[in-house]
Amino acid sequence: MSLREIVPRRRAVWLTFASAAVFAACIAGAWVGWKSDYARAWDLPVYAGYGERVTEGELPYRDFRLEYPPGALPVFVIPAVDLLSGGDDDARVWEPVDEVSDSAWGYAATFALLMAAAGIGAIAATSASLATLGRPLGDWLLAHALLATSPLVLGGLLYTRYDLLPTALSAAALALVLRGRAGDVSLGEVAGTPPKLI
């Protein structure tokens, strides 16, 4: 198949799954390779603090000041559920790095899995956009190579920040607009909405 040929449906599905698998392997490799990053450089302790406050019954904007948009809360709260993050009753200890508690690592691992899922969602949405636009194989390979290997370049940034969530939502919104399933929504509205919510 030539790089200029349009990608058939079966090959598009295969490319999407292959890209998602490479992305998952790369983010796992980045997790292992960058696991020794100093916890104080992460945003995770801040996210965990917000998540813990919500799981304890406090409401953002009423009981505490939240420095992030409300759409970011689910990815802060889900890892804070003790069942998901190790279940110990001890406080999460984030530094020094050789004394990070099991609960803190549990939070970090759950958060990383959520970001990996968001990254895979962005890959699927990108595939939908490429298919809708009828892009040739060369474009698919370039787009998927960049997305799938991004964890190797960005390392801990991908799994210690919540940026993959708005990325995935923006890619999905773009795919819907391109497919004509977003009603009378303009591309400008699609591009502007996720940053306001997430």
Image: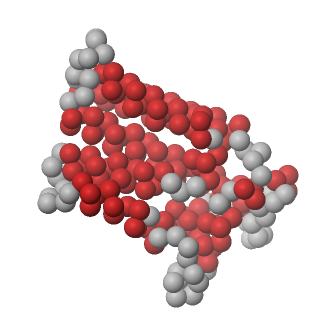
Query: Which residue is pictured at 64% across the width and 46% down the height?
Result: 156
Q: Residue at x 60, y 73 (%)?
A: 50
- Residue 6 drawn above or below residue 43: above
Residue 154 percent location from the top left of the image? 59, 41
From the viewer's perspective, is 172 left or right of 154? left
Q: Nearer the viewer, residue 154 or 31?
A: 154
**Where is residue 161 drawn, in percent x and y?**
58, 55
Q: State the residue lying farthest toward the bottom.
A: 62
- For the N terminus, give its image quadrant: top left
- Scheme by which the image is coloured: secondary structure
Q: Residue at x 20, y 37 (%)?
A: 132
Q: Is residue 164 above or below residue 140?
A: below
Please say whether residue 181 is visible from this viewpoint: yes
Q: Quadrant of residue 111?
A: bottom right
Q: Is residue 81 visible?
A: no
Q: Nearer the viewer, residue 132 or 21?
A: 132
Residue placed furthest toward the front: 188
Quadrant location of residue 126? top left
Q: Residue at x 51, y 84 (%)?
A: 61
Q: Viewed as shown, does residue 50 lie left or right of 100?
A: left
